[in-house]
Amino acid sequence: MESSKKPIVKGQEEKRVPPEDQRAKVIEWEDYEQELARLCSLTSALEESKRKKIEAESLSRSNELDQMREKLESRKLVMGNMSMHSKVVKEKVRKQEEQLSAEIRSLLTGGSSLSVANKRMQESSRSLAGEKGYGNLKNLQKLLRARQQYMVSQVSLLYPVKVVIRKAPEQELESFSSSIKSGVPDGSKPVDQATPTISGLHLTVIPFTKMSFFTDKKEVQRSSTALGYVAHAVSLIASYLQVPLRYPLRLGGSRSYIRDYTPSIEHSASSTTLDSIISTSTKPVEFPLFIEGQDSTRAAYAVFLLNKDLEQLLNFIGVKSLGPRHVLANLKELTRTILSPEYIDM
C-alpha cells in the first residue's frame, strides 16, 4: 500500500526534469478531492463573475441604448415641431405674399384711377374756366330764378295776400295773440286789428277751436275757401322751386286735404289684459283743410301741417318762419322774398 501511495509522476521526473517554475504541483491523494472541489468552486466563481460582468456590461449598454433612444425621440420631436413651425411660417409667408400682391394690384388700379380722376379734374377746371364754366352756370341760375320770380308773381296775382284793418268781433287766425302779449287786459273790448287776407278772405280762429250750432256757416265756408287758396298757392310755388313737400296736398278747392306720411300708432286693449297693441300703418293719413262735417281737431292739425309746408319753403330760400299760427303771413313773406331783387343773386 505504501508503494502505491507514491507520487504518480515519479517515473516522469526521472525521464524529464522541467524548470522549477513549470513544475507540476504535487498533490497528495488525500488532498486531491479537496483540491478538486476547490478548483471547481474557483471555476464556478470565475464563471459567475464573468456572467455578472457580462450582465453588468449588457445592462450598462442597454441603459445607454435607452438613453440614446430617448435622445433620438426628443430630437425627432424637436425636428417635427420645427418642421411644423416651418410649414406654418411658409403658409403665413404665402398668404402675406398673396395679400401684398393684391394690395399692389389695388394700388396700381388706384393709381390709374387717380390719374384718370386727375385728368378729369383738370378737364373740369378748364371747362369751368372756359365759356361754359362757372360764369355760364351762374347766368343759367339767374335765368332760372328770374323764371321762378315770374311764375310766383302770377301766383301772387291769382291769390293776392294783403293786409287790411277791420273791426272784427272774432279773433283772426293770423292776428291771434294772448291778451298779455297785446297789452289788453282780459275782458276788454277788442280793438281794430291789421290782419292779412288772401283774395279778400280771412282765416278766423273760432271755427277751428270752438264749433257749435250757432257758428256762422258762411264764416266757416270762407275759412275753408281761404285754406284752399293757400294750399293751391303752396303747391304751385313748391313745384316752381322744385321742392318736394314734406306733407303733400290733395287739392279740391274748399275741400282740400293734406297728407301726413308719419306712421300712425293705434292702441287697443283686450278685456282680459292691459297690454296695448301698437300697429304701424304705412298708408298716409289725410287731414281736412275745412271744418264743415269734420272734427275741428283734425282740421286744426291740417292747418298746422300746411304751415309746416310753408316753413319748409321758407327754409329752402333761407328765410325763417314767422310762427305756427301765421299761415297767410308766412305765405306773404315767401312771395315777397322770391319777388325781391336779392333773390336772383342768392
Image (spheres, grey):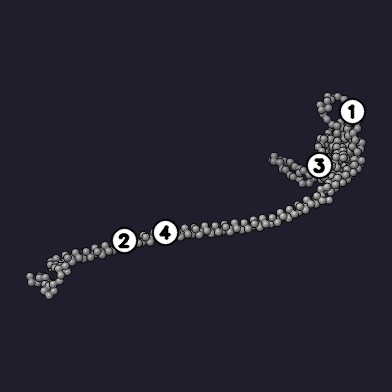
Where does the C terminus fall, quadrant-wise? top right
Which of the marked residues, 3 or 4, is nearer the chain's N terminus?
Answer: 4
- The type of residue carrying mark 1 is Asp
User: Residues under labels 3 and 1: Cα distance?
Assistant: 35 Å
Q: Which residue is mark 1?
A: 192
Q: Nearer the viewer, residue 30 or 301?
A: 30
Q: Mark 1, residues whose alpha carbon is within 10 Å: few (<14), some, or many (≥20)?
A: few
Labels in figure, total: 4
Q: Which residue is mark 4?
A: 71
User: Residues under labels 1 and 2: Cα distance?
Assistant: 135 Å
Which of the marked residues, 2 or 4, is nearer the chain's N terminus?
Answer: 2
Q: Nearer the viewer, residue 102 or 208?
A: 102
Q: Which residue is mark 3?
A: 316
Mark 1: secondary structure:
loop
Mark 4: secondary structure:
helix
Q: Residue at x 31, y 61 (%)?
A: 56
